Amino acid sequence: MQITAIEPQANKNEQVNLFVDGQRLLTVNVLVVERLGLAVGQELSPELLARLRREAALQQALDRALNYLSFRPRSRQEVHHYLRRRGVAPDLIEAVLERLTELGLVDDRAFATFWVESRERFHPEGARALQSELRARGVAPEIAAEVVRQEDDEERALQAGRKKVRVLLRGGAARNYEAFRNQLGAFLLRRGFSYETAKRVVRQLWHESRASAADVDPADPTDEPMD
């Protein structure tokens, strides 16, 4: 078996068609050709052919993983599950993950940091909820606990609560403490904040809302428990 041509594939600069004995054998990424040092006129032994097929499959799986990672960082488990759903062989999945780890493209600690920062910016949640989300994505509990700081919960709750208060103000709930407490408190509890954190934040945001709205109920029963 002799390589008789290596031709670029139309509209896909990174892909080439490999011809053996005048017949197209397969389409591979040009990186595979370079990695194996293939050239026209070279004899393709059974051993080299087997290696070529594996490298081609590995590169295809790697390209799929890179495309998946292009949208946002992913945990190791997310990449593994994605490739498995695409029918990639288990040994190739491990090889891809090893290569991505070497390149610094799969790093569960970096992923966890990204996830927490994104949540804090767009959808603040309590430490319990954040750690649960990270563990569900395969992040080790010790990494999740390291990245998610419990002591930041009150600030996260205030950030989430202030966004919710704007909605309550438009709906009129901020005129009455009981309605304000029940709606905002339940919202914070659903976001994974503890009862004590939610209680303190409800009290603070109630005072803030009173300062910004002159027509709220003057009563201030902030020592009452949340329902």
Image: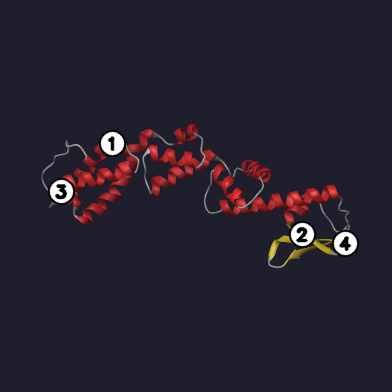
- Residue 21 is labelled as 4
Residue labelled with disc 3: 176
The local crowd at label 1, few if under 14, some if 14 to 19, many if 20 or more residues have their Cα within 10 Å, is some
Q: Earlier in the sequence, mark 1 or mark 3?
A: 3
What is the x, y in percent for residue 66? 61, 52
What is the x, y in percent for residue 217? 12, 48
Q: Quadrant of residue 154?
A: top left
Q: Which of marks 3 and 2 is nearer the N terminus?
A: 2
The Cα–Cα distance between marks 1 and 2, rounded to whole angstroms, is 62 Å
Q: Which amino acid does label 3 sit on?
A: Asn
The local crowd at label 3, few if under 14, some if 14 to 19, many if 20 or more residues have their Cα within 10 Å, is some
What is the x, y in percent for residue 158? 30, 43
Q: Which amino acid does label 2 sit on?
A: Leu
Front residue of 36 and 178: 178
Asked which secondary structure carries label 4, the reply is loop
Residue pictured at 23% horizontal, 52% vertical: 168
